[in-house]
Image (cartoon, rainbow, N blue to C red):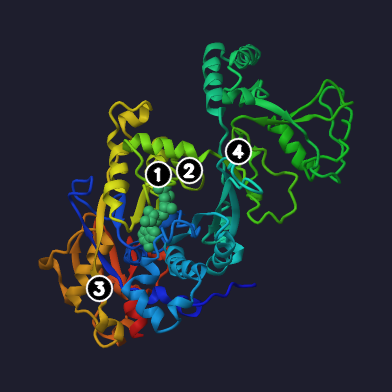
Amino acid sequence: MPTLNFKGKSIIRTHHLSVPYRQLIPDVKKSLADKPGLHDNLIIHGDNLLALKALLPSFAGKIKCIYIDPPYNTGVGNGKWVYNDSVNSPMHQEWLKATVDIEDLTRHEKWLCMMWPRLVLLRDLLREDGVIFVSIDDHEAHHLRAILDEIFGEDNFIAQLVWEKGRKNDAKFFSVGHEYILVYARSVATLRQLKTIWREPKPGAKEVWEQYAALRKQFGADDKAIEDALQEWYRQLPDRHPSKALSRYKHIDKNGPWRDRDISWPGGGGPRYDVIHPITKRPCKVPERGWGFATSEAMQQQIDLGLVEFREDHTQPPFRKAHLRPVFEELDEENGIDLNGDEEPEAEEPVVVGLQVMPSVIYKQSQVAVKYLRSLMGGKVFDNPKDYEVLARLIRYVTASDHGDIILDSFAGSGTTGHAVLAANEDGGNRRFILVEQEDYADTITAKRIRKVIRGVRGAKDDTLRKGLGGAFSYFELGPALDDEAVLSGNTLPSYIDLARYVFFTATGEQLDDAQVNESRYYLGESRLYQVYLLYQPNVEFLKTTPLNLTFAERLPKSEKARLVIASHKYLDDDRLREMHIEFCQLPFAIYRFKA
Ligand SMILES: C[S@@+](CC[C@H](N)C(=O)[O-])C[C@H]1O[C@@H](n2cnc3c(N)ncnc32)[C@H](O)[C@@H]1O
């Protein structure tokens, strides 16, 4: 795979390993929660390099979806995007001085040096079935794609979405009114294994279904009466109503509204077997491109399910029925989605209607988000906010509503992603967000916006906004580094109790009660959700040779609560741990790696 070389890369590649872990300190006053804790929605104030590292012990491999909108590095505004987090902070100054000449880096190299370690940490935070979206424009899109290929693996590239945001009439050559969202999976192989299919509701489909359901109630089993009434309903809809575009779903059977679809093999060259017409009992005309089902058995199965509609006689091929709400057998989950776009189309590919696959071009004017934020915050507080409805759509598309999926944005700005998660949860979901913002407006803009959205805004035109979306969040500051100079130099490891305080807090979001600690049993005490154990001694040999293994696991006292074991490594697989009601949390990698 061709790779991108840039000055500083050889050093920055492993930089994330030397970033110290830090404590996350809750700020009760800035939180919107009775008891701030890590189980909540989170807003973290601080440099995301440090914040992401601080999140690792509790969230490594647990984030379902990441959306980031990093500085685009447009070169205008005289360094308006913040370099100080990556290149000019004392930590980086020192690091850069020792390696490359800071003056010598181009602005693109600085940007790449800033992005690399953050993307590596973001990758480590993603679940195996997780997905990352990165907004970018032409200034860095090509560089970004190259380093994402390297960090995530080019096989995990999913799409480069185009977001068309409006015309720029002052352009000299072309009006470049679009930007991109690069989409990568943590592991496409895992998505395939899980037979993941991403779909979203077709606009207007819900309304058609509700109308159908009401008519079904009114007319009972009389499909013809429902059909007539539904067609009349479509006719009287205003032209711009989204359901109008679905008026081809005008036929009714026991599975609801359906439309006819072509039954031939896409692209031609399909099989040609006999399909007998049920009335004339003669073989139906075979479509020019051949039948759309590979075998006559597969075709017969569709006929038996009532998913094929014959014409009056055999002189014309029948139709496929495509239902507004897909009948289970219409979805061939085996086929999955073509994540690479490089496979032959399958003739039996699911006819999914009512649901639709998302196109790779999104149309939404940037001004909509600008105006919305202005009215929400009572004035202009932030340049170039993203559109929360677009982000909510992406989030809904790739997350489950009710699995407590976590969505992370480490360049949070005005908090659009947090708002989008709350909006996505209007489907009754329990998704959570983690936002990181380094500027002081983490409280005065990011958190303020989320407070407003949660509590509601008096006098707002939008109904939902007036009422508020509900919810809570905990606000955190970054605390001191856990692994100080001495630890990193490899001379000292923290004492049991020092480390215990840190890991108990980062893993549970609660403070350790020293009185409960029993070091000889490696027991730290109970949190709201867990009995917590820390398998640790400040001794490298111990760390190398003492994993969470079956013997240790079997000796743990039984408990109503799950047992959370924090250790340097484990010799038990996830299924076994789940059976034993044990959760494993890896000790901060840096401590182990630096000493090993
Ligand atoms: C382009 S804005 C994001 C806007 C956001 N998507 C919205 O809709 O409001 C980028 C944000 O990332 C923040 N940022 C830049 N570098 C950061 C860092 N190292 N750590 C945390 N935040 C950072 C900036 O302060 C800025 O607020």
Cβ atoms at labels 1 and 2 below 8 Å apart: no
Which mark's residue is nearer the viewer, 3 or 2? 3
Q: CA distance from mark 1 to mark 4?
A: 21 Å
Question: N-terminal of the two: label 1 or label 3?
Answer: 1
First in sequence: mark 1 vs mark 4: 4
Residue ID for mark 3: 482
N-terminal-most mark, 3 or 2: 2
Query: Between 417 and 337, which is closer to the camera in this rendering?
Result: 417
Mark 1–mark 3 distance (CA, rounded to whole Å): 31 Å
How far separated are the C-alphas under marks 3 and 4?
A: 48 Å
Q: Earlier in the sequence, mark 3 or mark 4?
A: 4
Q: Check disc 2 and give the amino acid type.
A: Arg
What secondary structure is marked by label 3?
Answer: loop
The secondary structure type at the circle numbered 2 is helix
Q: Are marks 3 and 4 in contact (CB under 8 Å)?
A: no
Where is residue 254? Give x, y as percent. 62, 23
What is the three-letter code of the residue carrying label 1? Answer: Val
Is 165 situated above or below 114? above
* CB-based contact (under 8 Å), mark 1 and mark 4: no
Q: CA distance from mark 2 to mark 4?
A: 13 Å
Q: Amino acid at mark 4?
A: Gln
Between the C-alphas of marks 3 and 2, the distance is 36 Å
Asked if 588 appears above or below 256 in the picture, the reply is below
Q: Nearer the viewer, mark 1 or mark 4?
A: 1
Where disc 1 sits, the SS reads helix
Q: Residue 301, percent across and down?
A: 72, 38
Q: Crowdedness of circle 1 by 10 Å Cα count: few (<14), some, many (20+)?
A: many
Q: Which residue is mark 4?
A: 356
Mark 3 Cβ and ligand 1 under 8 Å apart: no
